[in-house]
Amino acid sequence: MAGLPTSWVVVRLSALGDAILTTGLLDLLHRERGWTFTVLTKPANAPVFADHPAVQAVASPGLGDLGPAGWLRFAAGLAKGHAGQGLLDLHGTLRSRLLSLLWRGPVRRYPKFGLERRLLSLLGPGRASGAAARLAGLNVPQRYSLAVFPQARSRAELRPRLYLAQPVLAQAREILVRAGLDPDRRPVALHPFATHPGKAWPAAHWRTLAGELDQAEIPWFVLGQSATPSPLHGPRDLTNRTDLRQAAALISLARCLVTGDSGPMHLGTAVATPVVALFGPTTVHWGFFPSGERDVVLEPDLACRPCSLHGGRGCDRPDPCMAAITPARVLQAMPPRP
């Protein structure tokens, strides 16, 4: 794209997984075009972009900037401070559109496929087959890439990536040792938490899986951030005991990561650790399946899926779909011992 600037502000304000999924596109644009970025995101997402070669800075709105008047002031200041740079809108909400109206440079925005998503939600994959096929054909990073490229780039080219320096990797090894684990045995990482109840694998299944791992003499540990108690207690339960980059480093030392549809799932792909991902109310159509070469998705074969975009809608079934994924299937899906 001749004439475009090489410095850009990229907007992705929402959840952890959404932020992680931008990293592959930023990496690709840096390598192919020399572009560099200021990332506008939530403060909690900032560690995702630490040490990323394409990222020069991270900007985050404060609490007072999120209301209408505050956002207008914040957006005007950002547009003035980055005049002449490009704006890459990977958020696509009213806030980012307002920012684009004030922007003093080129603006590129990704297609959210809102019509297709609505049709699929209303009619289901069988009756909305065209929308289902289009959504299933492009994952979220590929949709992001359409903000810049006329055709979506491949999933492999856009795979998310975190850059972990040696000090945080050394910290992760020390954390495992303190938990009574040998890092060189590459224990299995378990993330038993979900933002929405519909995405949660039953606590009894987690306990069964841990027992089966113990029987097979496969070491494991638990990680994540949660206000609810972990279903697996003891010295190997690292819940709420690590920050985001330590969690990513721990996952990078693991044989594999077992998790539901979650932000940490994308951390696994981004540090090249095989992921065994458990999907129930959400499906491939929403674009969030992990994209690593060794990642595996387990899901039940139910016609009612997907029942919601984020798994927050209640379910009338007596046997929720996540319960249909058995611990035996998870064990079978794990990569062989290193």
Image (cartoon, rainbow, N blue to C red):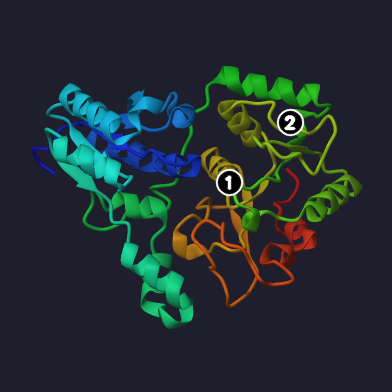
Which sits in the foreground, 87 or 5? 87
Residue 54 showing in the rendered view: no
Q: Which amino acid lies under the numbered mark 1 shown in the image of this protein?
A: Met
Q: Quadrant of the C terminus?
A: top right
229 on left or right of 169 = right
Query: Which mark identifies residue 265?
Result: 1
Disc 1 crowd, CA 10 A, few/some/many (<14, 14-19, 20+) = many
**Furthest-top residue in this view:** 167
Disc 2 crowd, CA 10 A, few/some/many (<14, 14-19, 20+) = many
Residue indicated by mark 2: 238
Q: Is residue 250 above or below residue 325?
A: above
* Residue at 64% in and 19% down: 170
Q: Which amino acid lies under the numbered mark 2 shown in the image of this protein?
A: Leu
Residue 322 showing in the rendered view: yes
* Residue at 69% in and 26% down: 241
Which sits in the foreground, 186 or 320? 320
**Furthest-left residue in this view:** 3
* Residue at 70% in and 58% down: 333
